[in-house]
Amino acid sequence: MINNKSYALILPLLAMLLPATAFSIDDSAHEKKGLAIAIETDRRDAGFGDSSASLEMILRNRHGETSERLLRNKTLEVTNDGDKVIIIFDTPRDVKGTAFLSFTHKLEPDDQWLYLPALKRVKRIASRNKAGPFMGSEFAYEDISSQEVEKYSYRYIKDETFDGRDHFIIERDPVDPRSGYKRQRVWIDKAEYRIWKIDFYDRKDSLLKTLSYDDYNQYLKKFWRANIMEMINHQTGKSTRLNWTDFSFKNGFSEKEFTKSALKKSR
Amino acid sequence: MINRLLILSLALLPLGALHSAEWSSKASIEARHFFNDALNPQQHDGNLSITVESEFYHDWDDDSQRIVFTPFARIDQHDSERSHLDLREFYWRKTFNNTDLYLGIRKIFWGVTESLHLVDIINQSDTIENLDGEDKLGQPMVSLSHSTDLGDWSLYILPWFRERTFAGIEGRLRPPFVVDQDNAQFESNDKEKHIDSALRWSHVIGDWDVGLSYFHGTDRTPQLIPQMNNGVTTLLPYYAQLNQLGLDAQYTYESWLWKLESVSRHHDNRLSPNLNRSKAAVGGFEYTWYGLFDSATDIGLVMEYQYDSREANQALIANNDIAIGSRLTFNDVQDTTLLALVASDLDQRERFISLEGARRLGDDMSVNIEARFFSNTTPQTQLFALRNDDYLELLLTRYF
């Protein structure tokens, strides 16, 4: 914490001391390289068509007490826009059968609907709530939303090797002013362009959370998915672990399975 | 009838032979305390009640066929009318390409607003469950839903009418006279066997969610007619025939939800002929501030205006009312929420106040607390009959 704060103070001072021209040329080259890495990461995951998976979320508070949620999701890849996603909640039991439909967009706000099984009612909901927690977890809505190149501006920071892999470190700044983050620092391996770690900095530029990815598997000889994602909140001591199972690709999903009327029928 | 259906359907289910099937259940205990003495000496100041609802579903034929079975039962300490059984759902669905065929008992919701549900008409309200009108009786039907690029079309044929539920002589939250539910009157000679029908079109157009609906059949809301019988006054429910055109629309923009529901009603032969044509609307907005003071808490504000061209001489007509509500969502692990709502009659100044809190306990229990107050009532106002029925409710639910 202390390190981060002093770092944040020193950085603007350093910038003022450096000659303006030299700084901006260096800056622009790093921006180009950062963007190129983001585009390549996106390109390598393009063309998956559709996918489905099951998810166990384990919420842990600072005393180590845990609470569990089971969800399933279906994703339909939409070229030139964000993906369409359905999430179905199986536990906690009081929200069992609740289902969430989102048409994610690159820059426009997402279109979202929520199905409430007790009332058999589908509600269109506001999607401005990017920074809010998803199901009481340490994941914000924007963390689980479709990742699109256009959602951030980028800069390359440096290379780093750990766990026997070479990584690029890039930083990305959310374009949307409603994001809960000032910046994110992302570790991407050079061999396969998989994300291994993200540091999230809050609006005051203090380190807020760290997301670690583990146990990657490759599907259809192309698409990498991590079975384990662990988000640690450094400011509250809480954490959330996601255990993914049953990844399935090319299920033949179509647009009509991602509509308001389909949401009412989901199980 | 419902009793027989329940037993029959239980006997028909070959439970052992099914796969990809699922049972889930919930049981609850409800305690109510009324703050004031009852108007009628046969009513009680406290009440306990238990409910059980189970749901069974099974998908087969590559998920193109589904059966759903949802029985519900309440046992009430004092009110024999509130002790009741219902089949909330018991239907079979078959999907053909873009069309769904449904046969059986279902629950359908239409509409967008929060304080009043004008357009929603397929199911009868199970009003003895809760005043909010969100509990519904299962409605037998044959229905077809068809999806096109220009919206979804649904056709409903409703061959059996369900009468509204009312509190019995020992129950609170009722008119001063008991509703005689065994002698309901109908405009149609077919009585509850009148075949009702409805058609609905709904569509999403960008930020707009819109629906248009038409209903032809027995009005779900009865007129209550005082009747003297052996020196005892009772209220006879009279169900007229109704043609209703409904519109519902929601515009979603950033943190704003703008909502409107409107109906145009034509009764062939209501008991007061000057009321045969009427219009009603409810509209307003919902706005949410996210992440209050850098916390995870959201606060929402709902404001809706309710209009009805009929005078407020019938029970609970919101003819010139405003409802203002606020919802606090803590976004915590237990999903804690608080909801406050005030509905005021702008002409007569009477008020309905509702406070609700809900929270999950552990993984498979939840607790709800609800308090409701009827204030500024006078003998001329609609809520006068409920003037002594302010109550506090504690509801514990266990999920299985």
Image: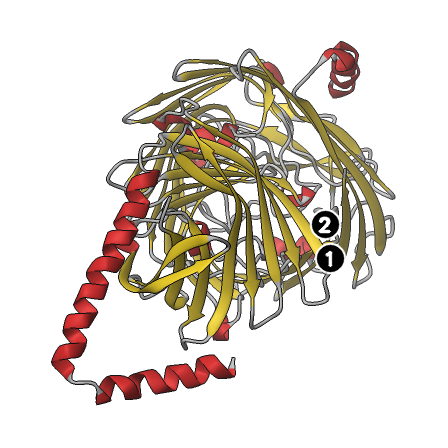
Q: Quadrant of residue A154?
A: bottom left
- Residue B103 visible to the viewer: no
Left or right position of B396 against B204:
right
From the viewer's side, name the closer residue of A266 and A124: A266
Identify the residue at image location x=40%, y=45%: A112
- Residue identified by numbered label 1: B389
Q: Which mark is residue B173?
A: 2
Left or right position of A228 against B258:
right
Q: Which badge, 1 or 2, comes first in the chain's sequence?
A: 2
Q: Chain of mark 1?
A: B
Q: Chain of mark 2?
A: B
Q: Looking at numbered disc 2 in the image, what kind of residue is underneath it?
A: Leu
What x and y, as percent, mark residue B312?
51, 50
Q: Label 1: few (<14), some or many (≥20) within 10 Å?
A: many
Q: Label 2: few (<14), some or many (≥20) within 10 Å?
A: many
Marks 1/2 in contact by CB < 8 Å: the verdict is yes
What x and y, as percent, mark residue B80?
83, 36
Label 1 and label 2: CA atoms lie apart by 6 Å
Identify the residue at image location x=62%, y=69%: A237
Task: Check disc 2 and report its element: helix, strand or loop.
Answer: loop
Q: Quadrant of residue A8?
A: bottom left
Quarter of the image for the C terminus of chain A: give it: top right
Q: Which mark is residue B158?
A: none
Identify the residue at image location x=59%, y=31%: B124
What x and y, as percent, mark residue B395?
76, 51
